[in-house]
Image: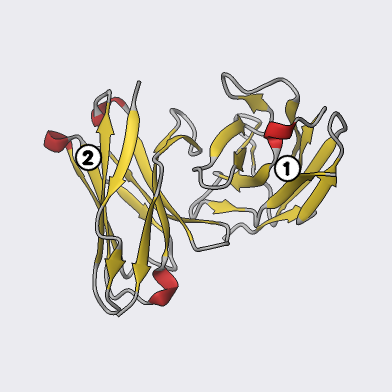
Amino acid sequence: QVQLQESGPGLVKPSGTLSLTCAVSGGSISSNKWWTWVRQAPGKGLEWIGEIYNGGDTNYSPSLKSRVTMSVDKSKNQFSLKLISVTAADTAVYYCARVKVDTSCYDLWGQGTLVTVSS
Amino acid sequence: DIVMTQSPDSLAVSLGERATINCKSSQSVLYSSNKKNYLAWYHQKPGHPPRLLISWASTRESGVPDRFSGSGSGTDFTLTISSLQAEDVAVYYCQQYYSTPRTFGQGTKVEIK
């Protein structure tokens, strides 16, 4: 069955760039229209970062829009998140997830990856 | 942005008893053209990602036990666990997908009394 796996550096310096990839295995990224990123600061709730269509269209959280870029690489069957100018407030577990067909809720999640912003 | 507010923040329920979680949205998430409520429920166990339990306010996902049920419309929603089991200990979140940005409630922690 389809699985998602996040990967990327676990430690990013303040003012640096956070870059994560979500690999889709067991199926084609093109088999689903939308994919999303959600994060969770330590001990806190879920925060929506944005979503990307497999054709490249995006929707971003207004609070992060100026710093976020999402992309899809169909040849590698993966999608990516880039967040620039990070601060300690960006320390969180970052999840990638699949948007359920004909909805905008999330029926398949990666295990999540902790990214710490610290010097 | 649509603000989602859950109550209570936490609750402790005896095994086999009913647990009820409320979720209120700052504006209606009922789409008039299709009469669907754009509201989902998840739970999250420690160290794990969230799991989708219910979409469209009341439609259980495949494999979700039928002790979980969702109800409500417009701005007020409820998740009910009819007979709490030990494996239901988790934090529960509601989410609206009526508009962007998608927003989640702050979470309700469910524990065993």
Q: Chain of mark 1?
A: B
State the SS at label 1.
Answer: loop
Drawn side of residue B21 relative to residue B50, left or right: right
Say which of marks 2 and 1 sits in front: 2
Where does residue B72 sit, x and y in percent of width and height? 77, 36
Q: Nearer the viewer, residue B10 or A62?
A: B10
Q: Residue at x 58, y 57 (%)?
A: A45
Q: Which x, y percent locates residue B20?
A: 82, 40
Tell me the quadrant of the picture where the N terminus of chain B can be found: bottom right
The reply to whether residue A33 is in sight is no
Q: Work out whether residue B47 or residue B27 is closer to the camera in this orientation and state it.
A: B47
Residue position for label 2: A78
Q: Amino acid at mark 2?
A: Gln
Q: Position of residue B18 (x, y in %)?
A: 86, 33
Residue where numbered disc 1 is placed: B74
Q: Are marks 2 and 1 on the same chain?
A: no
Q: Quadrant of residue B60?
A: top right
Q: Amino acid at mark 1?
A: Gly
Q: Chain of mark 2?
A: A
Asked whether, in this view, residue B54 is left or right of residue B76, the answer is left
Between the residue at mark 2 and the residue at mark 1, the CA separation in whole angstroms equals 36 Å
Residue contact between numbered discs 2 and 1, judged by CB atoms under 8 Å: no
Q: Is residue B22 visible?
A: yes
Label 2 SS: strand
> Eyeballing the image, is B3 above or below B34?
below
Between residues B18 and B89, which one lies in front from this camera angle? Answer: B89
